[in-house]
Image (cartoon, rainbow, N blue to C red):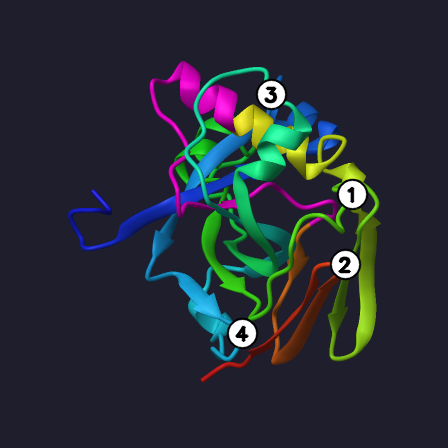
Amino acid sequence: MRAQKGEEAIGYKVGCTSAAIRSQFGLSEPISGRLFRPYIYNMETEINWAEFVNCAIEPEMVFTMKAELCGTGFSDAQLINAIESVSAGIELHHFRFWFSPSTSQELICSGGIHAGLIVGNNSVSLEQLSFKHELFSVRKNGNLVVEAQAVEIMGGPLHSLRWLVETLTQRGSRLKKGDLVIPGSPVELIEIDQDTEVRVEIQGVGEVVSSFKES
């Protein structure tokens, strides 16, 4: 339906990477959702937070894939070799569940309440990353809101990527060259309900700064 409206699927997100969130929804594994153009923005784009239903954000590593991946049992080295670059990103959300109590069905049908992605301008080579110890931090108007290490993402974002590849393979699909992948956030969603400058920094990767203004 979204493709028929002119949107283009360009990658995947992994959600519910936290054991606590999975327990809340009665899930035994994470979920995946699709990323779509035109909802991929660069950091110069001003975001109108009032256009979202309860705007919220998460810090994300953004993988750009340089090779197709299909199969099971990939080592960390094989996964790293399939990634072209890593950037810092901000995932955008419509943070609203319309039914109470919230259900896994609504979570999955909404693509993990995904609404868009802001991608930082810089990207780094992967040799300098551990994919475990990088510190994610989020600041609103210069004030630190939350921080956590990458290891909180299912033991590390490579584990999340491996889960995604194996799940797609079971469905008869695969990751493609050029796909974007956001493997999940180590922190909780952060609501944006007023004009705010958001700065996400990922140690060793870089930062992305975005202005959220009601217009």
Magenta highlight range: 165-188
* Front-most of residues 150 and 194: 150
Secondary structure mostly seen in magenta is loop
* Residue at the disc numbered 1: 130
As drawn, 124 above or below 139: above
Mark 1 to mark 3 CA distance (whole Å): 28 Å
As drawn, 84 above or below 207: above
Nearest-to-viewer mark from 2 and 3: 2
Q: Tell me the number on the disc at residue 204.
A: 2
* Residue at the disc numbered 4: 43
Earlier sequence position, callout 1 versus callout 3: 3
Element type at mark 3: loop
For the residues labelled 1 and 4, say whether their Cβ atoms are less than 8 Å apart: no
Earlier sequence position, callout 2 versus callout 3: 3
| Label 1 CA crowd tier, 10 Å (few <14, some 14–19, many 20+) | some
* Residue at the disc numbered 3: 27
In this view of the protein, can residue 103 be seen by the observer?
no
Element type at mark 4: loop
Residue 147: image quadrant is: bottom right
Q: Amino acid at mark 1?
A: Ser
